[in-house]
Each structure stands twice: as structure tokens, then as C-alpha cells.
Image: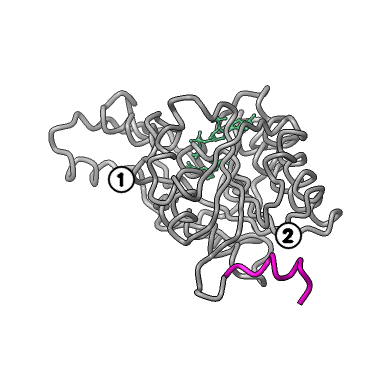
Amino acid sequence: MSSNSKANNNSSSNGEKKQVVCVTGAGGFIGSWVVKELLLRGYHVRGTARDPADSKNAHLLELEGAEEKLSLCRADVLDIGSLRSAFSRCHGVFHVASPVSNDPDLVPVAVEGTRNVINAAADMGVRRVVFTSSYGAVHMNPNRSPDAVLDETCWSDYEYCKQTDNLYCCAKMMAEITATEEADKRGLEVAVVVPSMTMGPMLQQTLNFSSNHVTRYLMGTKWSYPNAVAAYVDVRDVARAHILVYERPDARGRYLCIGTVLHRAHLLQMLKDLFPQYPVTAKYATIILPVESI
Ligand SMILES: NC(=O)c1ccc[n+]([C@@H]2O[C@H](COP(=O)([O-])OP(=O)(O)OC[C@H]3O[C@@H](n4cnc5c(N)ncnc54)[C@H](OP(=O)(O)O)[C@@H]3O)[C@@H](O)[C@H]2O)c1
């Protein structure tokens, strides 16, 4: 066994995991859960944030095992030098960071940021990258029959996403393609987790986009609900899926990560039943949406 393959062996003789892995966007909703699950499995974790000292990342230092096994470092996905420093001596990278927004100015952050992450990882000798894509890169296609079964071969219609201002979906499609192509060029192993709308307990203090999706219905600040279905998944399952594909050397390509598909009326009924004291949105919008994104 070479010294390199020894270093890449993820278990010591007593079975404790010793690998160093990096999570980009560690302080975000999904990133925080990925960090938590990695620490619980014994990994040494380096988490990146654009401002690690910001109080919005303080919850990471409270996670079980953080004191011994978590370090935070400053990295911006648009600064490849900062990424190389963050990935130094890492076996694996979980590239979770991305703006979750339809702002056109942020599309290049997702795409060029991903190119930088893959190249920085290859430069630093990282073995394996897990990329967080989105169901928005899969389901936004109005020409597909509503009865069609979606799987990992499905892609959203880029032009449709662009015309309907679903630029987040454009960004995730392009970022996912970039991750795969750059990794191929650089001989890096990449596995892609494709979560749908992600729900569940927040470890961070600030409200992320998908948690806000529920909050707006719960508080009734979203005026009406559409005649639309959406796919949902629990954030803890998303975090576990990241680690599962990381730990399976044969895992390559895309893995859809979806818990359930609900009509919006069903989701709102669940909210009403669980939280009868809240003014849950009740007004039904008659407009028919073939597909709905963020
Ligand atoms: N939540 C969902 O429903 C859902 C579903 C499917 C896929 N996803 C994907 O999951 C990932 C995380 O989403 P989330 O819901 O956890 O969102 P979030 O809480 O808003 O987290 C996004 C993270 O991206 C980081 N980030 C943004 N711009 C950055 C930049 N220029 N450089 C470095 N980091 C940057 C932020 O870090 P700082 O601001 O601290 O630097 C933040 O930690 C994204 O890739 C998203 O597309 C989310």
C-alpha cells in the first residue's frame, strides 16, 4: 500500500474515521447538516464560509465533536486561491455553497464558483468531490407529460427556465454540467446529489430560502397557494445522502434525493393540522402552473 493510499483509507485500526474533508458553504442550511453528520461519523471537517467569524456561523462550533474535529476557514468560491488553501490535505470535498437566488448577477457565482472548486480540488490532490445540485436542474420542463416518471436522466429545459426567470435553475444546470465536465478533464471522481425542496430543522439562526417557503405559508404572508405539486425531502436525509455517495467508491453521476411529492393544498393542510394557532394561507390561486421552481 502506498503512503497515499494509506492516507486515503478512511478508517484507522480501531475503526475511527480519520479523513479530513472540506464542506463549502458550511454555515448554510444543508451545509450545517452535512458538517454535523460528518463530525458524528468521526471525520475531521474543514468548513468554509466567506466570513467564518460572522455570528451566523457560530452554531457550527456548538456541534458535537466540533471542538476537536472542526475548523472553519475563509473562502469565496470566486477566489480559487482561497479554495486551494481550504482544500489543502483534504481527501474529499463537499461542494454545497451556492447562491439560492434568481438574481442574474449570481448565476456566474454558481457556475464559475463550481469550476474553481473542481480545479482547486484537483490542484490539491483531492480524491473525490460531492456536488450539491438541485431538482430545479431536473424537473422544469413544460413539454414533459405530468405523468412522466422522472429519473436521473432528466434535465430541465434551459430556455424555458431562462424565459420564465427561473435563473436559479439555469445556474444549477450549468453548475452541475461544469462540475462533471471539469472533473472529467482533471481525473477527479465526482458524485452529484440532487435534492428536491429541502425541509426540516434548521441548525443555523438565519432563514434560508426553502425554510422561508414554509414560513410564508405558515404565517399567511404568502397570499395564495398555486395548483401545483412539489417534491420535498428532509434535510437530514439530504446530509446522509451526501455522505453515502462519498463513502461508496462506485457512486458516480447523479442521485436524486426526494422524500415525497405533495400538492400544495396537502402541504398546507399538514401545516394547519400541526399548527392550528397559525394563520396558514387559505386562498387558492386558480392559475395552473405546470411546474414551479423557487
Ligand atoms: N434548500 C433547498 O431546498 C435546496 C434544494 C436543492 C438544492 N439545494 C442546494 O443546496 C445548497 C445549499 O443550499 P441551502 O438551502 O443550504 O442554502 P443556504 O442556507 O442559503 O446556504 C448557501 C451557502 O452558500 C454559500 N455561498 C453563497 N455564495 C457564496 C460565495 N460566493 N462563496 C462561498 N460561499 C457562498 C453561503 O455561505 P456564506 O454566505 O456564509 O459565505 C451559504 O452557506 C445549494 O447548492 C443549493 O442550490 C438546496
Please indicate whether residue 28 sits to the left or right of residue 140 in the image.
left
Q: Which residue is drawn at 66% across and 59% down?
A: 191
Residue pointed to by mark 2: 127
Residue 224 in sight here:
yes
Q: Residue at x 86, y 54 (%)?
A: 185
Q: Which residue lies furthest to the right in this view?
A: 185
Q: Is mark 2 within 8 Å of ligand 1?
A: no
Residue pointed to by mark 1: 267
Work out whether residue 254 or residue 167 is closer to the camera in this orientation and state it.
Answer: 254
Displayed quadrant of residue 165: top right
Report if the CB atoms under discs 1 and 2 are less than 8 Å apart.
no
Ligand 1 shows up in the quarter that is: top right
Q: What stretch is highlighted in magenta?
A: 1-11
Residue 219 position in % (x across, y down)? 26, 27
Amino acid type shown at disc 1 = Leu
C-alpha span from label 1 to label 2: 41 Å
Crowding at dot 2, Cα within 10 Å, few <14 / some 14-19 / many 20+, comes out as some
Crowding at dot 1, Cα within 10 Å, few <14 / some 14-19 / many 20+, comes out as some
Q: Does the magenta stretch include residue 8?
A: yes
Work out whether residue 293 or residue 68 is closer to the camera in this orientation and state it.
Answer: 68
Work out whether residue 283 or residue 245 is closer to the camera in this orientation and state it.
Answer: 245
Residue 142 position in % (x across, y down)? 59, 45
If you read the primary sequence from the N terminus, does the residue marked by circle 1 or circle 2 appear first? 2
- Which secondary structure, mark 2? loop
Quarter containing the N terminus: bottom right
Residue 65 position in % (x across, y down)? 42, 51
Please tell me whether residue 160 is drawn above or below residue 91 in the rendered image.
Answer: above
Amino acid type shown at disc 2 = Arg
Q: Residue at x 62, y 39 (%)?
A: 169
